[in-house]
Image (cartoon, rainbow, N blue to C red):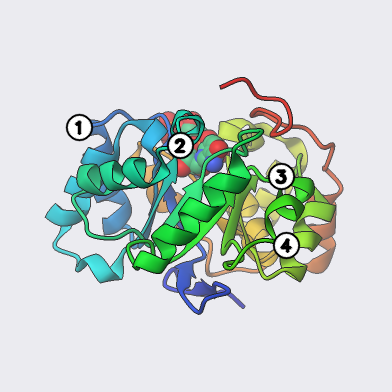
Amino acid sequence: MIGDIKDCAMLNNGLKIPWLGFGVFKISDGQEVEQAVKYALEAGYRSIDTAAAYRNERGVGKAIQESGIPREDVFLTTKLWNEDQRNKRTLKAFEESLERLGTEYVDLYLIHWPVKGFYQETWKAMEEIYQSGRAKSIGVSNFLVHHLEDILPDSQVVPAVNQIEFHPFLIQPKLLKFCQEHQIQVEAWSPLMQGQIITEPNVQKLAEKYHKTPAQITLRWDLQHEVVTIPKSTRSSRIAENAQIFDFELSQEDMNALDALDQGKRIGPDPDNFNF
Ligand SMILES: NC(=O)c1ccc[n+]([C@@H]2O[C@H](COP(=O)([O-])OP(=O)(O)OC[C@H]3O[C@@H](n4cnc5c(N)ncnc54)[C@H](OP(=O)(O)O)[C@@H]3O)[C@@H](O)[C@H]2O)c1
């Protein structure tokens, strides 16, 4: 059982990623993100997920440095933005992210979206970054099975992670199975459906049963699916609440009940049809 906030998944290159991380999408750079990351680190999170596109890498880096926690004890993820793929500036964009984060390496560097016509070539540049040692692992985000099939045959490095939209309304079982079979760790973005899951009656019922909150039920469901999860909040009470998911276990029957909510419903863009 995953029973401690320090517990980690093992990536396909032997690197460990905490099962629980902290997402910072839509948190402003400067004081807001610095405060949020500070709350998360104080609550025991040791993994932070940002992206060049979130425009808050500086604040994330500053908060980690000022926390006094050794850099090697924090798992830091950032992502390559689409425009940088189109302009073939992956290596340059990576350098710029490192500079903004104020660090010499990241633990995980992801291709943010599979930009049609570009992502295969981008993966080669990602491999170069990996070989340089400045990204301890590399992966992808929003890749469907056919995107993965496009890059795997020619790759020297199998993506360590695929970060995808994942919550009880969107499970994508075939994609999950494909990733598991290829030792690609699945990581859930918008695990709380950007807050919408909280009012789902079946989730609320389970919350009452386990004396937990709807958010905790949903995040625990991620862990029991062996999916790394990265909820976001700016409020210290919710940041702490979302980390209290290691002291209970959902029964198989209740896991199945949550699985039955799957409707293939996205709250974010479709990776086969996005225009940014
Ligand atoms: N790779 C990608 O394309 C991609 C796309 C989207 C997101 N992500 C990553 O995934 C992370 C998480 O996804 P997300 O930020 O979209 O959504 P999320 O984590 O599913 O939900 C965040 C929303 O839920 C609210 N919330 C958080 N904890 C709560 C709780 N315990 N009870 C009630 N409401 C709660 C937050 O409000 P407050 O802040 O007001 O508490 C916020 O509005 C992002 O921050 C980002 O790092 C990646």
Measure the C-alpha gap from mark 3 to mark 4.
40 Å
Measure the C-alpha gap from mark 1 to mark 2.
29 Å
- Badge 1 is on which residue? 30
Measure the C-alpha gap from mark 4 to mark 1.
42 Å
Q: Which mark is residue 88?
A: 2
Residue 253: x %, y % from top left? 84, 63
- In the rendered view of the protein, which quadrant contains the C terminus? top right
Residue 272: x %, y % from top left? 74, 32
Label 2–label 3 contact, CB within 8 A: no
Residue 249 vs 28, above or below: the answer is below
Ranked by sequence position, the earlier of labels 1 and 3 is 1
Residue 170 vs 47, above or below: the answer is above
Total labels: the figure holds: 4
**Front label number (1 vs 3):** 1
Does residue 30 appear to the left or right of 272 in the view shown? left
Does residue 34 appear to the left or right of 135 in the view shown? left
- Badge 3 is on which residue? 203
Residue 168 lies in quadrant: top right
Q: Is residue 214 visible?
A: no
Mark 2 residue type: Lys
Label 1–label 3 contact, CB within 8 A: no
Mark 1 residue type: Gly
